[in-house]
Image (spheres, rainbow, N blue to C red):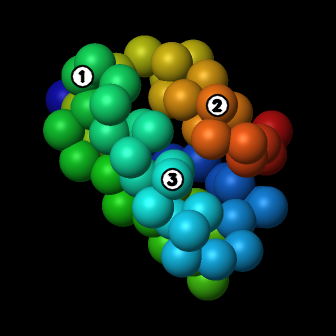
Amino acid sequence: MGVLELRVPDMTCEHCVRAVSAGVGDVAGVTAVEVDLPGRTVRVSGAAAPDRVRAAIARTGHRVAP
């Protein structure tokens, strides 16, 4: 099990937090999602492929910083 931390700079509200949490939470292998709105980060625990987590965030309309 690993931890992946990503910056999502365009998250601005609680709606963003809920959308990203739900989208990432649906990815196979994800065991936990923590979204920090003030820090604009998403911390994902589990065995999910990083590219699938990034794609899930993109599907919510947000971008992951490089």
Earlier-in-chain disc, 2 versus 3: 3
On the picture, is 14 further left or further right than 46?
right
Residue on which the image places disc 3: 19
Against 44, is 59 above or below?
above
> x, y percentage for residue 10?
79, 61
Task: Please state which of the two labelled residues, at mark 2 or mark 1, is closer to the viewer.
Answer: 2
Q: Nearer the viewer, residue 58 or 3?
A: 58
Residue 16, by quadrant, is bottom right
Tell me the SS state at disc 3. Answer: helix
On the picture, is 21 further left or further right than 26?
right
Disc 2 from disc 1: Cα separation? 18 Å
Residue 47 visible in rendering: no
Residue lying at the far front of the rendered structure:
15
Identify the image quadrant of the N terminus. Answer: top left
Disc 2 from disc 3: Cα separation? 10 Å
Residue 31 visible in rendering: yes
For the residues bearing labels 2 and 3, Cβ distance under 8 angstroms: no
Instruction: Say what amino acid the circle numbered 3 marks.
Output: Ala
Specify the label residue 29 is tagged with. 1
Residue on which the image places disc 2: 59
Instruction: Say what amino acid the circle numbered 2 marks.
Output: Arg
On the picture, is 11 further left or further right than 32?
right
Tell me the SS state at disc 2. Answer: helix
